[in-house]
Image: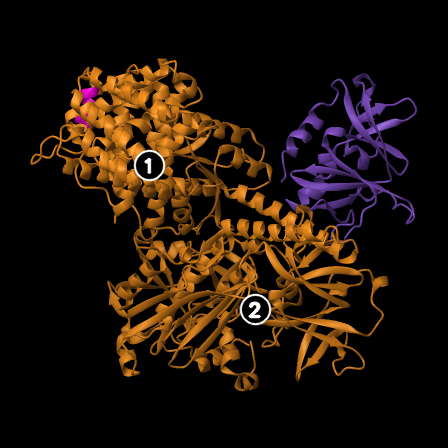
């Protein structure tokens, strides 16, 4: 495993993916470079071409450095040096120079090939090549390019064998030169020239060089197309078998011109011809191979046959290998796929309309073609959907590593079993469930499983099991996360729920275990003490639930004391097409996603189910429980004139998370598969609708968002909760709201910290608290954790257990001593009194109707550790908890993938753009960012141009710009400053990058 | 899907005053307005509209235009004119703003006029603000005056509010 020192352990887990991305991306660059370099030789004075080549090499170098691939980096670096001189005009572009660069390119390719197979760079060094490159710069370039390139061949001659054909003819350099001569001859041959008019000569030459190298038993790392594809290509140009002989003649002549012995030249050419013969058809293959010994003049027939078959085999392998990366997979912009998806969706809708017409008309003339169209459309739809599907295993890839780390850290033996990793789901859904899943698996291992001693005592095997499984079930994906640990402590959860006023004692007594377990998803329930003392789940099960519900999924928990607990997540396969129930209310139709619909109830005077009213609130008696009802009519302020006068209603019993409520509608139609389209921007602030769609009859209907409905009826919709104190009907955008952990500590008002900063909540036993340098510390997960108090008036408890809020960065952990955890409240955070008390508080805000001090976590961390780790989220007053929004502009998907998690982990809210113009589109779309981080070397609009353009926009002119670049020469930095960048950071220096961001934001904070 | 409507729009907006500007004339509450032809995607007769509950009053609904969902804005309401009589017919002109199709509902659609720049004038200073804010200027026609609608501005409060 190539493990770069600069990456955190978590990043290493993702290495496989990173490496894969790197390989794909670099393979693409290689292809471009091959072509561009040859072009450069022809147009040595084209600065744009040179710039592009330089940029590509530079990217490769930088990426290798980032990934810890020293050989590649060294070669790319040496080549880049020459290119730099070319670019600066210090050295004139010469064929020798280009040959050297090409040789480095080949070396890089050969290393990449090994890298792809073994995930590690091959052993060895490239001193020979690098020396040549460097001496070229020093003006000591040798005159014979062929000789240079030959000695640059990566593998030394094998001493114990007579020289191979490859070595005899002079290696890559000779082949290169021979091809050059050969091609010139071919191009001037009137019989062949017409066929080659439209051929990309550069490409062919490279291919031919590779091909010949392989034929001559050259180093295995030279890969070329196999014979069959060569013939196919030639055939495509109109060169058929008779012409092959001519080509062979030219090649032989070319080889001879380079002082290669007749015998060797003939051998090489005949091998090629034999292979071509063998590839023509399976029937002829045996014959062709059999022929080889006859044309072989210099080697024994046995060896030759061996050679030929080996060559053939190797060529085949090479073909396969290539197809693995390049030929069989292409990278397509997601936008393109989304576009296709939209078109297909529309086609489905038209098909539905046609089918509806057909059903009502007598004319059967269209029946058969329509059925065909129906079938084709369905297949097309499935095909396009498949392009978006990815195995869920992609979201699991990091888990084994996380579990391994946890088991070491916690001293537990954990066996992670993953079943159904191949289950596919829509990539959009996949992205959204990744984090919740990781969180849950971590929780299961951390809190669900007991330590080995406890397990032994309970009569279980020492190794705890965490089971993760995924499967398809009726258009949904069912994901289960289970453990065989201690299970949830239902009694404690009930007690906690009662203590928090979520339920009453009487109710909780009557409650089943399953019902009680649902409390752990409750945002209002302080998850605080559960983490340790109630054996519960960590902070954020409510967040997990929210995230899953956001994509139309559901989550349930089952738990058995002493036997473990399991979570079942049900999510739709795709977000684009959902099965929906079409209902009507006051003459308008709406769609309700089926996944939320539990049952349909018809209420009428005659039937037993009657809608009753408590004052004006409708309710329904359903199986001895009162079901709260919402009237769509009232909620959506529909036309009162059209209200159905009949007393008959349909009630759509809907479940959103743990909230169950009935939606009162006039009529219920069929269920239909609908294609969700986003609503027009003008309507996006209406939280009642999650989208709109076109039904089979061509009419537009709005899709109701059950979450929006549930939010409207507030907590009252939750059957477990009779209290309405938490109720909020405000439909402010979720992003404006911040989850705050409210607690009491020391004197004065309640205090709060943003929940996002809290690593966990612990209770430590007073006995375990030690003194270090007079300050209280506690051993925590193998580290000493300093315990700090909010102010001096606060004292630790005398005995029992002390509640502690743990804040953690990767290196530091501190515990803030609190008297009592009060609640977790999601509210708009507006710091009103920015009065600072020796820096401990950010200010005072009204949270859940009570004035609350907002604690400055950064201060305490800084105090506890004489290092200003200054939590990224603790910033200027007021904005303390909003994440800094960063726009990352980089053309390399690789870097976007690397930097996004890095920055996100550092607490920033990251948006990416592929190019300057993409970024400017975001500007036009009205997006705001706190900082823009831009690459300099980008195709099209480069970083400098981008910065200059940004400075001219009205919206972003004051947004600080930080440049991200591989080279930090002072000239570049000056240019950057002129263009409007406030800072200039080396792209591959992770720490410097974070530091620069921190500084920029700090200086912004000072200015504000 | 959204194609490149900004180009069209920009063209429509930038060419003001140049030779041979073409406008589609529409009428609302007795006044003629001109919409730059280049920004027009479709002209439709009365369509089946789906009401969008809770939306701003000028958003009168959504309609299906060949598989795209188009938001319908009533120009009368947008310009704070009285609603048209229930039995009065109407037409709608579909335009693209920032990639989103909008249908502007008008009383009637006239013809396409090619107007010479020398008949163009800036907005009269006294023009009512509700009109002025969406007008780019006025063309003097032989018998009437044609107010040039600024489509982006027209949908701007709507669009901006969403942004």
Give the chain letter for orange.
Answer: A
Answer above or below: position of A444 versus A934.
below
Answer above or below: position of A850 versus A112.
below
Q: Nearer the viewer, residue B117 or B107?
A: B107
Q: Is residue A985 visible?
A: no
Q: Residue A661 is drawn in which quadrant?
A: bottom right
User: Residues under labels 2 and 1: Cα distance?
Assistant: 62 Å
Helix, strand or loop at mark 2: loop
Q: Which labelled disc corresponds to residue A157?
A: none
Q: Nearer the viewer, residue A254 or A619?
A: A254
For mark 2, name the chain.
A
Q: Earlier in the sequence, mark 2 or mark 1?
A: 1
Q: Residue A152 is drawn in which quadrant?
A: top left
Is A642 magenta? The answer is: no
In this picture, residue B45 sits left or right of residue A428:
right
Q: Is residue A274 visible?
A: yes
Q: Quadrant of the C terminus of chain B?
A: top right
Query: Residue A797: x and y, percent?
Result: 36, 74
The span picked out in magenta is: A146-152
Is A149 magenta? The answer is: yes
In this picture, residue A902 sits left or right of residue A911:
left
**Label 2, on which residue?**
A657
How many numbered marks appear? 2
Q: Quadrant of the N terminus of chain B?
A: top right
Q: Residues within 10 Å of mark 2 (few under 14, many from 20)?
A: many
- Residue plotted at (76% across, 79% down): A612
Q: Nearer the viewer, residue A586 or A942?
A: A586
Answer above or below: position of A784 versus A966.
below
- Residue plotted at (58% across, 43% down): A339
Give the chain letter for purple.
Answer: B
- Residue plotted at (23% across, 37% down): A290
């Amino acid at each position: 495993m190539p493990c770069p020192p600069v990456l955190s352990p978590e990043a290493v887990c993702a290495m496989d993916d990173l490496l894969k991305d790197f390989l794909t991306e670099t393979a693409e660059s290689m292809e471009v470079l091959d072509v561009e370099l040859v072009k450069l030789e022809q147009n040595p004075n084209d600065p744009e071409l040179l710039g592009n080549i330089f940029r590509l090499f530079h990217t490769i170098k930088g990426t290798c450095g980032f990934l810890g691939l020293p050989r590649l980096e060294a070669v790319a670096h040496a080549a880049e040096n020459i290119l730099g001189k070319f670019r600066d005009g210090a050295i004139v572009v010469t064929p020798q120079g280009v040959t050297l660069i090409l040789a480095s390119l080949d070396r890089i390719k050969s290393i990449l090939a090994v890298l792809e197979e073994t995930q590690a760079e091959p052993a060895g060094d490239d001193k020979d090549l690098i020396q040549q490159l460097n001496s070229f710069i020093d003006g000591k370039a040798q005159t014979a390019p062929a000789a240079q390139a030959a000695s640059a061949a990566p593998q030394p001659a094998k001493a114990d064998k007579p020289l191979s054909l490859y070595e005899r003819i002079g290696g890559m350099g000779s082949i290169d030169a021979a091809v050059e001569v050969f091609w010139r001859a071919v191009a001037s041959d009137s019989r062949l020239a017409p066929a080659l008019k439209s051929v990309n000569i550069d490409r062919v030459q490279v291919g031919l060089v590779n091909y010949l190298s392989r034929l001559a038993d050259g180093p295995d790392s030279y890969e070329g197309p196999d014979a069959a594809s060569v013939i196919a290509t030639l055939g495509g140009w109109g060169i058929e078998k008779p012409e092959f002989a001519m080509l062979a003649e030219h090649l032989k002549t070319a080889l001879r011109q380079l002082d290669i012995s007749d015998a060797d030249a003939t051998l090489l050419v005949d091998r090629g011809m034999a292979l071509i013969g063998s590839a023509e058809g399976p029937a002829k293959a045996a014959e062709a191979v059999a022929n080889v010994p006859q044309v072989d003049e210099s080697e024994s027939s046995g060896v030759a046959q061996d050679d030929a078959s080996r060559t053939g085999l190797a060529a085949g392998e090479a073909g396969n290998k290539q197809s693995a990366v390049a030929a069989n997979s292409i990278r397509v912009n997601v936008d393109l796929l989304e576009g296709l998806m939209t078109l297909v969706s529309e086609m489905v809708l038209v098909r539905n309309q046609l089918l509806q017409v057909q059903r009502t008309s007598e004319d059967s003339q269209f029946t058969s073609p329509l059925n065909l169209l129906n079938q084709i459309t369905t297949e097309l739809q499935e095909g396009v959907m498949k392009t978006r599907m990815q195995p869920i295993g992609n979201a699991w890839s990091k888990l084994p590593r996380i579990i391994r780390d946890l088991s070491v850290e916690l001293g537990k033996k954990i066996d992670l079993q993953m079943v159904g990793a191949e289950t596919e789901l829509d990539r959009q859904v996949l992205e959204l469930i990744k984090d919740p899943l990781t969180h849950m698996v971590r929780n299961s291992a951390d809190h669900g499983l007991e330590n080995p001693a406890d397990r032994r005592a309970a009569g279980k095997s020492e190794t705890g099991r965490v089971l993760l499984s995924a499967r398809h079930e009726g258009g949904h994906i069912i994901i289960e996360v289970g453990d065989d640990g201690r299970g949830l402590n239902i009694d404690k959860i009930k007690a906690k729920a009662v203590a928090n006023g979520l339920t009453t004692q009487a109710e909780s007594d009557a409650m089943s275990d399953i019902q009680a377990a649902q409390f752990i998803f409750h945002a209002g329930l302080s998850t605080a003490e559960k983490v340790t003392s109630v054996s519960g789940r960590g902070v954020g099960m409510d967040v997990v639930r929210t995230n899953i519900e956001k994509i139309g999924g559901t989550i349930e928990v089952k738990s058995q004391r002493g036997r473990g607990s399991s979570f079942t997540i049900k999510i739709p396969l795709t977000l684009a097409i959902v099965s929906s129930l079409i209902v009507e209310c006051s003459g308008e139709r709406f769609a309700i996603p089926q996944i939320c619909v539990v049952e349909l109830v018809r209420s009428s005077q005659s039937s037993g189910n009657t809608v009753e009213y408590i004052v004006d609130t409708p309710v329904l008696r359903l199986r001895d429980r009162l079901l709260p009802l919402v009237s769509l009519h009232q909620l959506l302020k529909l036309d009162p004139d059209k209200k159905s006068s009949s007393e008959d209603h349909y009630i759509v019993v809907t479940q959103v998370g743990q909230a169950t409520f009935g939606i009162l509608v006039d009529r219920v139609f069929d269920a239909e598969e609908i294609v969700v389209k986003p609503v027009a921007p003008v309507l996006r602030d209406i939280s009642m609708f999650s989208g709109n769609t076109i039904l089979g009859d061509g009419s537009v209907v709005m899709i109701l968002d059950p979450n929006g409905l549930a939010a409207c009826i507030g907590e009252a919709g939750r059957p477990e909760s009779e209290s309405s104190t938490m109720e909020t009907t405000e439909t402010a955008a979720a992003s404006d709201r911040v989850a705050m952990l409210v607690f009491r500590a020391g004197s004065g008002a309640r205090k709060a910290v943003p929940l996002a900063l809290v690593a966990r909540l612990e209770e430590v036993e007073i006995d375990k608290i030690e003194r270090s340098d007079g300050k209280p510390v506690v051993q925590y997960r193998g580290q000493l954790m300093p315990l700090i108090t909010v102010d001096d008036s606060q004292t630790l408890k005398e005995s029992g257990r002390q509640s502690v809020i743990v804040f953690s960065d990767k290196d530091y952990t501190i515990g803030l001593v609190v008297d009592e955890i009060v609640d977790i409240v999601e509210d708009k955070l507006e710091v009103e009194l920015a009065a600072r008390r020796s820096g401990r508080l950010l200010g005072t805000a009204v949270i859940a109707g009570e004035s609350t001090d907002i604690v400055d976590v950064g201060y305490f961390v800084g105090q506890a550790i004489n290092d200003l780790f200054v939590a990224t989220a603790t910033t200027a007053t007021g904005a303390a908890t909003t994440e800094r929004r960063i726009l990352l502009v980089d053309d390399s998907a690789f870097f976007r993938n690397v930097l996004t998690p890095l920055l996100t982990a550092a607490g920033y809210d990251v948006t990416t753009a592929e190019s300057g113009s993409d970024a400017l589109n975001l500007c036009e779309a009205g997006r705001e960012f706190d900082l823009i981080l831009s690459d300099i070397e980008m195709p099209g609009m480069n970083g400098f141009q981008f910065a200059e353009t940004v400075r001219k926009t009205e919206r972003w002119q004051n947004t600080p710009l930080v440049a991200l670049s591989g080279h930090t020469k002072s000239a570049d930095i000056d240019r950057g400053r002129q263009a409007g960048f406030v800072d200039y950071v080396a792209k591959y220096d992770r720490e410097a990058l974070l530091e620069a961001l921190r500084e920029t934001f700090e200086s912004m904070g000072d200015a504000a | 899907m959204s194609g490149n409507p900004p180009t069209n729009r920009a063209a429509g907006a930038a060419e003001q005053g140049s030779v041979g500007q073409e406008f589609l004339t529409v009428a609302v509450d007795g006044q003629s307005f001109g919409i730059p032809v280049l920004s027009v995607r479709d002209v439709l007769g009365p369509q089946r509209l789906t009401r969008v509950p809770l939306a701003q009053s000028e958003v009168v609904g959504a309609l299906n235009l060949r598989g795209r969902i188009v938001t319908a804005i009533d120009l009368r309401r947008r310009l704070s004119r009285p609603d048209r009589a229930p039995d009065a017919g109407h037409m709608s002109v579909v335009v693209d703003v920032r990639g989103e199709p909008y249908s502007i509902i008008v009383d009637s659609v006239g013809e396409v006029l090619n107007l010479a720049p020398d008949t163009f004038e800036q907005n009269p200073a006294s023009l009512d603000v509700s009109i002025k804010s969406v007008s780019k200027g006025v063309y003097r026609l032989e018998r009437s005056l044609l107010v040039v609608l600024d489509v982006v501005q027209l949908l701007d409060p709507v669009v901006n509010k969403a942004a």
